[in-house]
Image (cartoon, helix red, strand yellow):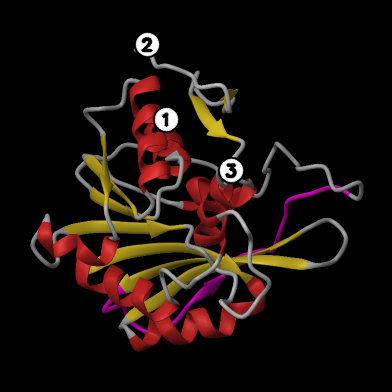
Amino acid sequence: MKVEILKDERVEDLQCEGLKIIQNKNFYTFTSDSVILANFIKLKKTDRCVEIGTGCGVISVLLSAKTQFDKIYAFELQDEMARLAEKNVLLNDLQDKISVISDDARNFKQYFPQESFDVVFSNPPYMHSRSPRNANPVVDKARHDVSLPLNDLCSTAYSMLKFGGKFYVVYTATRSAELIYALMQNNLEPKRMFFTENGKGKVVLVVIETVKGGKHGVEVLPQLETNDLNGEYLKVLHTKFLKRD
């Protein structure tokens, strides 16, 4: 579908089944975090899903090629980013599979009954509100947890999910203890998880799959190296658990 590209926007090839993504240089642009999470999420063709904080929509768009699902409802708090996500849905002709909702995900009960979804996923803002802030308000909200505190994220995911439903999340490794505590406080039991490493020995991210009401016990997967020694992103993620079935 024909989509207008504005002067501050660029179109990038996602190198996945012909998918493309529009990014705006004045907004928050996606990083490898989103690609890693999209590779980790497992869906079934009957799954109704929610993305909390879709940004430009890249995770939901990637999932359209990597797996099957019934529908994704992608919430985005910031109007500017929601409009960009809508453009990316149109650009890839995914209107039947992905619907962008320009609202705070915590307001989801205005759109859907509680416990309506099989899967929820999120690459949320994970810099602490006390860390240095960004002068650009769009970027600041995307990076800092002021607009979506960690417990609010987990409690919202819990309310959205059916019993036995899955919540997938990627977060900064430095706050992994806080994340796991918040998940378990909200009856979202970690079942699979791994950390990423930047090629220079620094652990950067934690990625977790949880189950609502699940039994105790988590499988800790091998650490994923995402960059080489020069800092270049490794485009081929060769670890077994990231391969599609």
Q: Main SS type for the magenta part? A: loop
Q: Which of the image's four quarters has the C terminus?
A: top left
Is 79 placed left or right of 236 in the picture? left
Residue for badge 3: 29
**Furthest-left residue in this view:** 113
Residue 18: x %, y % from top left: 50, 18
**Furthest-front residue in this view:** 135
The answer to whether 30 is drawn above or below residue 8 in the figure is: below
Residue for badge 1: 65
- Determine whether label 1 and label 3 are within 8 Å by CB: no
Q: CA distance from mark 1 to mark 3?
A: 21 Å
Label 2 sits on what residue type? Lys
Q: Please, what secondary structure does the residue beneath circle 3 have?
A: loop
Give the camera-side residue of 46 and 108: 108
Residue for badge 2: 2
Of label 3 and label 2, which has the lower sequence position? 2
Would you say residue 214 sits in the magenta stretch? yes
